[in-house]
Image: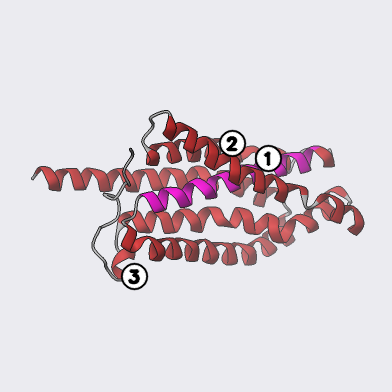
Amino acid sequence: MHGRGSNTVAQENISIFRLLSQPAVRSFFFTRFLTDPFTFFFLFWLPAYLQTSHGFSLAKTGMMAWIPFLGADLGALTGGAVSDWLVRRGTDPPLARRRVLFVVACLTPLTLVAVRVGSATLAVSLITLVMFLQASWNTNLTTLIIESTPPQNVARVVALTLMGGTVGGGLSTLLTGHVIKNLGYIPVFTALGFTHLTAYALMSISLRSQHVRASRKFAG
């Protein structure tokens, strides 16, 4: 039976400020800070994008704009199912979650294609796919956070990371309006395409360095 990855976050019951001083918690915080704006953008800007870039009427927007969020529902379920399948086949749980995160990070640059296609149907299909990927990312990231944290600290660590996502989403929404007004949608879709790769790289470096320090401390 697989155990929890309790060596990532300190096991003692500590304050929120001391939790934030830990590299693993900060990496999870900034991972959500960087990637939650993906959801915020499509939640708040998708109708305007479809109307501006593809000439959708308000009625047609209502008929089509819900589809990417159905894709997100399916992605949340599928992403969790895939990483659980890896665990049942013997993969260490945190590694299984990170493998799914890596695949998602490699596929989200499809946003660069979505914003450039002329077909509205293809654009909505690609947006649905990347929303599927985003929900899969969130499922596995949250699971990884839980599995990397001792039970007595789980709720606070998850709350801190969600706060990071909310702060990132709010700031990005303000910035997005200015970018779209002056430069259009292409720079926004382009930036979104690389947020997951950036977040995954930073998280991996942080977690790896913490494991190295912990191993040296244990060996010493």
Name the residue: 31% across, 64% down: 19
Location of mark 3 (residue): 16
Q: As shown in the figure, which amino acid type bears the numbered disc 3? A: Ile
Q: Earlier in the sequence, mark 2 or mark 3?
A: 3
Residues marked 3 and 1 touching at CB (< 8 Å) = no
Q: Which mark is residue 129?
A: 1
* Observer-nearest of 38 and 161: 161
Location of mark 2 (residue): 107
Q: Residues within 10 Å of mark 1 (few under 14, many from 20)?
A: many
Q: As shown in the figure, which amino acid type bears the numbered disc 2? A: Leu
What secondary structure is found at the residue carrying circle 3? helix
**Residue 171 appears at what percent x and percent y?**
57, 66
53 relative to 79, above or below: below
* Observer-nearest of 79 and 20: 79
**Residue 200 appears at what percent x and percent y?**
45, 44
The Cα atoms of the two marked residues, 1 and 2, are separated by 9 Å
Q: As shown in the figure, which amino acid type bears the numbered disc 1? A: Leu
Residue 133 in the magenta stretch? The answer is yes
Q: Quadrant of residue 169?
A: bottom right
* Observer-nearest of 136 and 193: 136
Residue 118 visible to an observer of this rendering: no
What secondary structure is found at the residue carrying circle 2? helix
Q: Residues within 10 Å of mark 3 (few under 14, many from 20)?
A: few
Query: What range is drawn magenta here?
Result: 122-147
Q: Earlier in the sequence, mark 1 or mark 2?
A: 2
The Cα atoms of the two marked residues, 3 and 1, are separated by 36 Å
